[in-house]
Image (spheres, grey):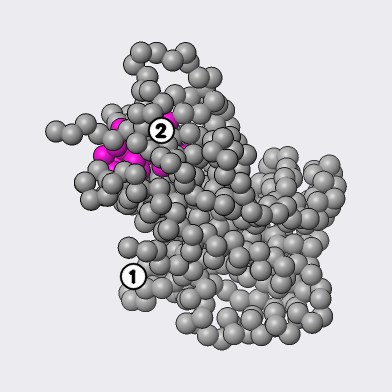
Amino acid sequence: MRPPFLARVIGAGPTGSLAALALADAGWSVTLEDPLTASQLCDRQRAYAFTHSSRRLLGRLGLWEAVEPLLVPFHALQLQDRALGRGLIFEGDDLPGASGPGPAMPVGWIGRHHPLLTLLLERLALHPSVSLRLGPPPAVTAASPAPDSWQLVVAADGPGSTTRQGLGIGCWGWTYSQHCLTAEIELRGQGVDQAWELLRPEGPLAVLPLGDGLAQLVWSAPAARCRDLEALSGTAFLDRLAGVLPEALEVDGLRDQPRAFPVALAVARRLSRGNTVLVGESAHRCHPVGGQGLNLCWRDVAVLHRLAARVAAGRLDPARLGPAYGRRRWLDLLLVLIATDLLVRLFSNRQPLLLPLRRLAMALLAAARPLRRLVLGVMTDGPPTLP
């Protein structure tokens, strides 16, 4: 029997950890490395939006039944243009293929970072084909594979990827004038169990349900305003937030310290070089509007999983995996990056010449279910990938 192919995954965040599990599922022997310990990796206060593309990938990897209890489903997404005073609702029936009897299909799910990554790391620790090397790197031993023995290296070490930089791969992109502020809040009122995307002149604001009257706030605004909000006392911050939330929602409390961070659009000039491929934020970043970030990263993993299985089955030369991965990812990446950028530029202003276009777009989406299905389908799954 041919020995398994060897893969090295650099970076053990949600994308790197899932990539390691996907490669192991495809029949590879995997080493997952990160300079942080497991507790340091899991100790992050943030939440993610999950679409059906992520659900399907977790299902293929046998993880969905374990992950689903950690997530909070939402069956409606309220989209509002606050400058126009108009809005519409995306529901599960607007998803492609959602017709027919049975319970309503969620539009998506929200989940916290800590329980998700804890589960992934536990599964990795138990997998016989995975070797975990978390924390400061140990001294090289005779049992360690030689650097040139890896058939595949997966760079999942984030937007400042030293792996990508070491390969001499640059990025296209820019930093937005907006920052993004996140916080966990207590809410009550009508609509606390659904997601909200408020398109405001200063930037989009998302309210994502976490269950039990809690929500994750993702507030985009000019950098100086975000820094000012971050510095406010809890009471003053809640007063400011109450002034921008919809009337249906009432904020009752703040569960953690608001944190602001820069927002950027970036895409690597190439997605592979030699035996190394870039996945997740090592390869791309987008504005958080629409909750596309993690799902875009995990669609990288879905393509990598399919290609790695073809290599293990002898149907693809390992040397061709990198170029094939790049060909299959470019369309999805460019579409999401362009769409999120245009959405921010179109709605984060009060330009009177753009208002008729925005009014028309909202009216068409509200009136035409096929158009809502098209938009929600692309947000959920991205465009069709190459065979």
* Label number found at residue 337: none
Residue 118 percent across, percent down from the top left: 46, 34
Residue at x-position 34% and y-position 44%: 319
For the C terminus, the image quarter is: bottom left
Q: Is residue 105 visible?
A: no
Residue at x-position 54% and y-position 31%: 41
Going by the picture, which residue comes out furthest to the left?
Answer: 1
Q: Which amino acid is tagged 2?
A: Arg
| Residue under numbered circle 2 | 8
| Residue under numbered circle 1 | 102
Specify whether residue 27 is painted magenta.
Answer: yes
Counting other residues with Cα less than 10 Å from the Cα at mark 2, is it few (<14), some (14-19), or many (20 or more)?
Answer: many
Residue 306 percent across, percent down from the top left: 32, 52
- As helix, strand or loop, the secondary structure at mark 2 comes to strand
Specify whether residue 222 is painted magenta.
Answer: no
In this rendering, would 178 be left or right of 49? right
The Cα–Cα distance between marks 2 and 1, rounded to whole angstroms, is 43 Å
Tell me how many marks there are.
2
Is residue 6 placed above or below 96 in the rendered structure?
above
For the N terminus, the image quarter is: top left
Residue extent of the magenta highlight: 15-32
Q: Nearer the viewer, residue 67 or 158?
A: 158
